[in-house]
Image (cartoon, rainbow, N blue to C red):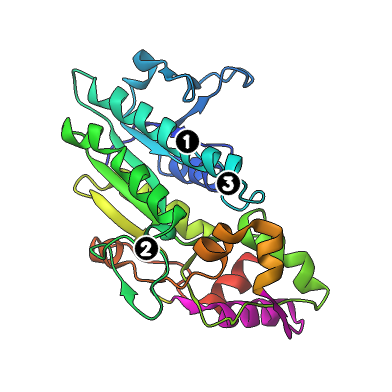
Amino acid sequence: MRPVDVAIAGSSGLIGRAVAPALEASGHRVRPLLRPSSPPHSDGIRWDPAGGWIDGDALAGVGAVVNLAGESIGARRWTARQKVLIRQSRLDATALLARTIAAMPDRKPALVSSSAAGYYGERGEEVLEESSEPGDGFLASVCVDWEAATRTAADAGARVAITRSGIVLDPAGGLLRKLLPIFKLGLGGRLGSGAQWTPWIALGDQARAIVFLVESDDASGPFNACTPSPVRNSELTHALGRALRRPAPFVVPAFALRAAFGEDAVRDAFLTSSRMMPKALTDAGFSFDHPEIDGALAAIL
């Protein structure tokens, strides 16, 4: 694919900060989508998703849009207000981008839009591929609506690829950033029973997968963004202990998680079993730099 301008919504987040240099390394120019209060940026494109406004003329000049916008799922306790914010921050941003792309009279940019493993809900031992049905619960319903918000662009002829991401591993953010201080003290351990399947992906592979989907002209539909080697939560925590050379003998009980994050968060995120496989991504020709948990943790730590 020839170099193009790529607009990124959510460029300041964990994944956005990795995707931008990965795109630039492939020769593309990154154009961050900026809120009205953000500092000036020579390549920035202004938008206000909550207000339903975007500089459509500037967006019309890009070859692809990467949508990573949305309130962090693990940032704070899932109160009723926080759940509204989790949902609306995703739907407002995605719907605005999709209808703006759909309204473009000329060649429409591709849209690579985020979703999450939460799409599948609690599935026990079931192997989950992109053709699997969505699950139940708050996060599953958010993901279903989040993905549906892209259809305006797809129905208008734009290429749309959706990344259903597992846990993104990097010490700078996300779950790993929260676990590291605890595990470094030798106080780490599994969450609940530890038997739940945990789909995961190293941040570098997540960024590479998004660049791959931007550059793959025939890539459309959902893609599970996770390695082909999901692990149980107990395996993940033991691997983290090994990487840090610390014991991980403890158990974080479900009631403690509920007290910290709320019932829905525990059920839909922390203790959910999701045995995802990246069939569409590997079938399209993508290969992982870090497909195994021990090698990934050794590299990123």
Query: Residue under circle 1?
Result: 88
Q: Which residue is mark 3?
A: 72
The residue furthest right is: 185
Residue 245 location, quadrant: bottom right
Image quadrant occupied by the C terminus: bottom right
Quarter of the figure that contains the N terminus: top left
**Residue 36: numbered disc:** none
Mark 1 and mark 3 in contact? Answer it, CB < 8 Å: no
Q: Residue at x 38, y 61 (%)?
A: 136
Instruction: Give the amino acid at mark 1.
Output: Gln
Amino acid type assigned to the residue bearing label 2 in the image: Tyr
Residue 194 magenta-drawn?
no
Q: Circle 3 sits in a helix, a strand or a loop, which is it?
A: loop
The answer to which quarter of the image holds residue 255 is bottom right
Which residue range is magenta in the image? 230-253
Judge the density around disc 1: few (<14), some (14-19), many (≥20) Cα neighbours within 10 Å.
some
How far separated are the C-alphas under marks 1 and 2? Answer: 20 Å
**Residue 34 in the image: above or below residue 293:** above
Mark 3, other Cα within 10 Å: few <14 / some 14–19 / many ≥20: few
Give residue 155's position: percent from left, percent from top: 17, 34
Q: Label 2 neighbourhood size at 10 Å, few (<14), some (14-19), many (20+)?
A: many
Instruction: Return the disc, 3 or 2, that comes first in the chain's sequence.
Output: 3
* Image x and y of residue 122, in percent: 42, 69
Label 1 sits on a secondary structure element that is helix
Residue at 79% in and 77% down: 187
Q: Report x, y in % for residue 120.
A: 37, 63
Distance, label 3 to label 2, CA atoms, is 18 Å
Residue type at mark 3 is Ser
Q: Which mark is residue 120?
A: 2
Dot 1 or dot 2, earlier in sequence: 1
